Amino acid sequence: MSSYSKDIFVSKGYKPFWKLLFPYGCFVLALVIWYNVWGQFEGADAKQTTVILLGTFFVTLILTLAGIYFARIIDYHFDFTLKRYKIVKRVGSIGFGSWKRFENLSYISLFENLDNLYQINLWYNTHEHFSIDTFWSYDESKEVALDIATRLDIEFYNAVEAQRSIYPIPPERKVRDEDRQVNVHITQGNRPLWRTIVSISLLAIAVFGFYYVIGDFNIDVKNQKMRIDFFPFLFSSISFIASFWIATVQDYQFDFKNDQFKHIFRVGPLKYGFWEAMDSLDYVSVYKEADEKIKVNLWYNKNQMVTFATYNSSEMALKVGKVLAKKLGINVWDVTDPMNGKQIDL
């Protein structure tokens, strides 16, 4: 995954094969659409040709952009002699990037990510960071992180040891409804009015779109062909999905008796969610992002995280974090300054 020279370190990104199936499927589908549409130009007048071209271009552009986004791999190049770095974004062997000087380097951090890999991050400009590399082996990742910190003459923060200090709770088991006990229920509440209006509008567009598609749907029995307007159907489908995404509210329920929690997705009266094992309920963190937004996060199962809310004010975020931590019976950590995290008294 990585390559070394005396003065250059290159961390090459990697995606497993199964993660590339969707993006490359988008590329293939875009080509198939152009191939099938090409034959429709014969006998079409200028207006029909323009409509076909614009519609095909719009759909295949979305598919191509989606393919590029999900197939994108990021490489990191570090020139320790000249104190500069280059972030290369590529699809396959095609990529781009430019060298930039280091400014205000903070420290190197090492932690175990959600894929159970050991990830090295470089922090700079106080709160900004990017991933340098990931490893299967803790010893190898620690050695590389220490080497990079030494080369850049910055501090090394090892978060793995803190993660390993968590004591496990017995694993999940099936629980009957009569034995279920919801100790804490936390909800995001209702969506603001403007999001409700947008969601209803998109849903109405989807309904009318599907009505048009169904009304225009026909089957040629003689030729055994079924015809459906592809573009109205696609537009209606996107509007339908977007309306539900905008209207979705998330709730959380905690059953401390059985060491489980439930993440609920709710759209009006419709709910979806299932109970999961809560091997450990660790702490609440109040963390400042690079854009100065303050996030209230709940950490559980050693290194998994749920974001409850985002604020512009540190005071409001800390207030909500304290209330959440008190309800769950855990600690709250103020990490608005990542290098000087501190536990807050409840």
Image (cartoon, rainbow, N blue to C red):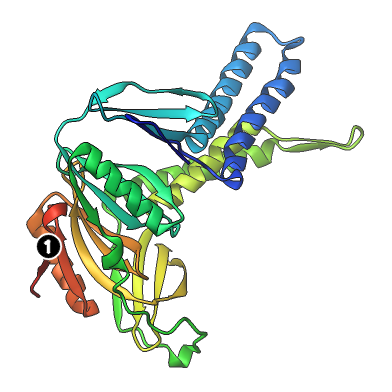
Residue 99 horizontal/vertical position (percent) = 30, 22
Picture coordinates of residue 200, whole percent (x, y): 41, 48
Q: Secondary structure at mark 1?
A: helix
State whether residue 336 appears in this view: no
Which quadrant of the view contains residue 45?
top right
Rendered view: 171 above or below 108: below
Q: Is residue 156 left or right of residue 71?
A: left
User: Image check: 16 left or right of 225?
Assistant: left
* Farthest-out residue, front: 6
- Residue type marked 1: Leu
The foreground one among 189 and 303 is 303
Instruction: Sort mark 1 into few (<14), some (14-19) or many (20+) by Cα contacts within 10 Å.
Output: many
Q: Residue at the location (61% across, 44% down)?
A: 17
**Total marks placed:** 1
Residue at the image point whose x is 73% and y is 23% from the top: 36
Q: Which residue is mark 1?
A: 318
Of residues 142 and 346, the one nearer the viewer is 142
**Residue 106 location, x and y as percent?**
16, 43
Q: In the rendered view, would you say 134 is above or below 234? A: below
Q: Residue pushed farthest bottom?
A: 178
The residue drawn where x is 31% and y is 62% is: 160
Q: Locate residue 74, reporting x and y percent.
A: 42, 34
Q: Is residue 237 visible?
A: yes
36 up-or-down from 313: above or below: above
In the image, farthest residue toward the top = 46
Please state which of residues 284 and 97 is positioned toward the viewer in this rendering: 97
| Quadrant in which the C terminus appears | bottom left
Image quarter of residue 278: bottom left
